[in-house]
Image: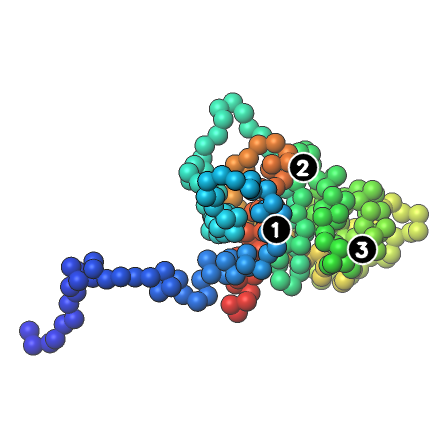
Amino acid sequence: MTRKLRTADYEATLNLTVTLREALPPNHLARFVADVIAQLDLASLYARYAPVGGEAIAPEILLGLLFYGYATGVFSSRIMKNSRNDGFDQHYNVQVATDQDSLLIVAAALSNHANDQQEVEPTLDALPAQLGSPEAAALDHGYFSSANVAALEQRGIEAYIAPGREAHHPSWRAFFGELPPPPAPDASLKVKMAYKLQTEVGQAIYRLRQCTVEPVIGVIKEVLGFRQFSLRGLAAAAGEWCLVCLAFNLKRLHRLMAG
């Protein structure tokens, strides 16, 4: 054979020195997480360190490990994702509010309620004041109640809450059928909301819910792999859920900034 082939010198390769700078490209998520943490005010964390004692690990290093770990699906320092207490299974109700355009999580909440009826106001309360209030909110039938509709309206938020379970595969008539006459002024809230969701605006806003909140929860479960809490107790689990949502936002913001 006369053709020249490129071969490998495995012994020489083993002696090569590779730096982390070479191993991590400029747009790597680890670099992004480090840059974000460098902009945080960690004074409250430093204040919790005792003035004397052995050399401790700086909080920005520990935060970096936590943020990067959760953003890449590593939720335990021992990677014991399947460990559980036999005979005991504690469940939590998690909530997120997401921005329609960026899909970033703008509010997160957690409770031990059995359903979503009591989750609207706590999630609204979790919205940062700097963001203001959204013009509208779309929620599925699990949140429908007169109290929740009133809570949204009191905050100047137009409510679009499904009054009943929607069909998974609606017929073409559901999209192209004629809009029925408006309900009477004394009609029930359920009837009025059903009509509202049949309007062109109502259909457009509620349809967006399927490509905002639902994909975010799907990514947290399927891509990040978060399916159970490592911590026990309501306060601890709420803190861990905030960490999960923060990790999602870091990963999402990194992707958005990378274009």
Image point (17%, 62%), residue name: 12
Instruction: Say which mark, if any, is on residue 87.
Output: none
Image height of 120 relative to 114, above or below? below
Image point (65%, 63%), residue name: 101
Q: Counting residues from the N terminus, which is met first, the one under dot 1 or under dot 2?
A: 1
User: Which residue has dot 3 on it?
Assistant: 157
Where does the image place residue 139, in percent across and percent down from the top left?
71, 49
Residue furthest top as drawn: 87
User: Which residue has dot 1 on it?
Assistant: 43
- 152, 133: nearer the viewer: 133
Q: Residues within 10 Å of mark 2 (few under 14, many from 20)?
A: some
Where does the image place residue 140, in percent across and percent down from the top left?
70, 47
Left or right: 43 as drawn, with respect to 57: right
- The secondary structure type at the circle numbered 3 is loop
Q: Counting residues from the N terminus, which is met first, the one under dot 3 or under dot 2?
A: 2
Left or right: 53 as drawn, with respect to 116: left
Q: Residues within 10 Å of mark 1 (few under 14, many from 20)?
A: few
